[in-house]
Image (cartoon, rainbow, N blue to C red):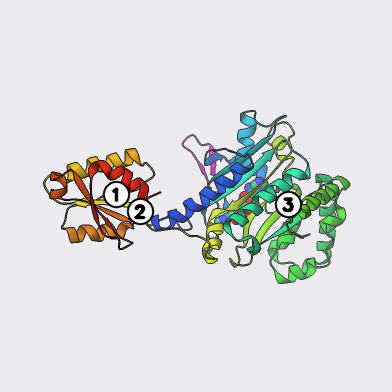
């Protein structure tokens, strides 16, 4: 036998048994963003490599080691998008959507990062995200967090995710803090692991993210970002906390929360769960007031978040919150006799015309009644619609109720649509 080709490691097929769950989640996501007046934006999956270097930052894990970058036939360096924010800003700038305007956008789609695959971490994964442009107060930060909290409510997992919040302050405040942090880390250099030593020189705030126990120990007494916060950023954070308190949303201020992308300032947040093991961050975001200008646009405040749909579905599945049926059809049409196929096809099309929401499956591939009923049962249909020779002669159909045990009935074809619409109200 010829050798089979497998999917790329960390890039998953979504099989029919799973797509029902995805659709259920996607429907809920669309409904909630619509309830807040957000509009969908769709951008290409491939962008110029520079877009991600200039936004996410050269000295970040994503840009240093995780991007799928290649030269196209024209020797231009292209990259499969590792996230959605940079593309939204690029598109907003390119089409003049941002300057002096308010935009509330959302997107959903595949992202690509060359990470080590494990539960909840993949090389092709999907993000659902929101980005808001043109608003600089804490009220919009609060709106985004309330929107995500509503999602947890809709999915019945509100008590399973915890909100962590921090402020990265202004560029200036962060630069002051960075200098103090480096001073402190240098005093303890001998206890830092190699990765932290390297980060201390290239991107010191990322040391705060270290999982190394010895580094964690040292960080206990490190200066914190909050001590260096500028007045305006502190007011912004206080304002946000007040609004979250008012909305009944609990949070924990986490001084060490810095995020892995360089474009953030002021508010950063993450929704974290303990039910997923190591990959517990379901949703993350923050402010990036400098990015629009950094990518060539006119200064425009911005804030957003993104959540990993695989992680969300894993969490919902773990907690038993996804209810979907495996059925592929409501009605299964079968029969035997010379003209059955012609009559059955015509009936099926008539039902689809009259009752477009009903899922109608025609038996294909022949076989005796026993085989046909087996297929009908497997389809999950409620009703088998039988078109036999007698039925054809008398312009009738027979309905057999597959799940309720109700007695089968034979009715005239003229009554069929009415009968079905009453049954499937
Ligand atoms: P991020 O923290 O890199 O932020 O990713 C956001 C979310 O995407 C994560 O919390 C996680 O749920 C999911 N995710 C990330 N990497 C993977 C992976 N390899 N496999 C599965 N899920 C993953 C951003 O991407 C920012 N653009 C968020 C943002 C939007 N900030 C402002 N606006």
Indicate left or right for 128 with 217 as reference: left
Residue 268's label in the rendered image is: 3
| Callout 3 crowding tier (Cα within 10 Å): few <14, some 14–19, many ≥20 | many
Residue 65 visible in the displayed image: no
| Callout 2 crowding tier (Cα within 10 Å): few <14, some 14–19, many ≥20 | some
Whichever of callouts 3 and 1 sits on the residue coming sooner in the sequence is 3
Secondary structure under the numbered disc 3 in the rendered image: strand
Q: Position of residue 199 (x, y in %)?
A: 72, 57
Circles 3 and 2 in contact, beta carbons < 8 Å = no
Circles 2 and 1 in contact, beta carbons < 8 Å = yes
Q: CA distance from mark 3 to mark 1?
A: 50 Å
Residue at the left extreme of this rendering: 338
Whichever of callouts 3 and 2 sits on the residue coming sooner in the sequence is 3
Of the pair 172 and 238, the residue shown nearer to us = 238
Q: Residue at x 71, y 54 (%)?
A: 269
Secondary structure under the numbered disc 2 in the rendered image: loop
Q: Which residue is mark 1?
A: 361
Q: Which residue is mark 2?
A: 328
């Amino acid at each position: 036998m010829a050798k089979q080709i497998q999917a790329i490691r960390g890039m998953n097929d979504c099989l029919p048994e799973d797509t029902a769950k995805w659709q259920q989640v996607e429907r809920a996501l669309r409904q909630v963003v619509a309830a807040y007046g957000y509009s969908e934006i769709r951008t290409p999956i491939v962008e110029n490599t520079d877009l991600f270097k200039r936004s996410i930052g050269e000295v970040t894990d994503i840009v240093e080691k995780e991007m799928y970058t290649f030269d196209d036939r024209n020797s231009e360096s292209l990259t499969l998008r590792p996230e959605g924010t940079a593309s939204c800003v690029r598109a907003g700038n390119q089409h003049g959507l941002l300057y002096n305007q308010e935009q509330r956008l959302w997107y959903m789609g595949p992202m690509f990062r060359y990470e080590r695959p494990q539960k909840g971490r993949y090389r092709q994964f999907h993000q659902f995200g929101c980005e808001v442009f043109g608003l600089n107060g804490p009220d919009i930060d609060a709106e985004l967090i309330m929107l995500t909290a509503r999602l947890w409510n809709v999915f019945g997992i509100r008590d399973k995710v915890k909100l962590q919040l921090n402020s990265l302050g202004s560029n200036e405040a962060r630069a002051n803090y960075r200098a103090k942090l480096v001073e402190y880390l240098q005093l303890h250099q001998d206890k830092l692991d190699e990765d932290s030593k390297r980060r201390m020189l290239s991107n010191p705030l990322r040391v705060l993210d270290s999982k190394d126990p010895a580094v964690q120990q040292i960080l206990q007494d490190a200066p914190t970002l909050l001590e260096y916060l500028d007045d305006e950023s502190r007011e912004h954070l206080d304002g946000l906390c007040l609004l979250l308190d008012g909305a009944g949303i609990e949070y924990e201020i986490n001084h060490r929360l810095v995020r892995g992308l360089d474009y953030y300032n002021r508010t950063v947040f993450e929704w974290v769960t303990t039910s997923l093991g190591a990959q517990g961050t379901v949703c993350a975001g923050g402010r990036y007031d400098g990015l629009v200008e950094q990518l060539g646009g006119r200064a425009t405040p911005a804030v957003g978040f993104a959540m990993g749909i695989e992680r969300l579905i894993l969490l919902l599945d773990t907690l038993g919150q996804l209810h979907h049926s495996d059925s592929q059809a409501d009605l299964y049409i079968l029969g035997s006799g010379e003209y059955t196929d012609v009559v059955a096809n015509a009936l099926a099309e008539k039902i689809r015309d009259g009752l477009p929401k009903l899922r109608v499956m025609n038996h294909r591939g022949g076989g005796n009644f026993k085989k046909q009923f087996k297929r009908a049962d497997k389809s999950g249909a409620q009703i088998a619609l039988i078109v036999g020779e007698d039925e054809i002669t008398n312009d009738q159909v027979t309905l057999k109720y597959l799940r309720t045990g109700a007695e089968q009935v034979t009715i005239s074809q003229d009554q069929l649509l009415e009968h079905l619409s009453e049954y499937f109200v």
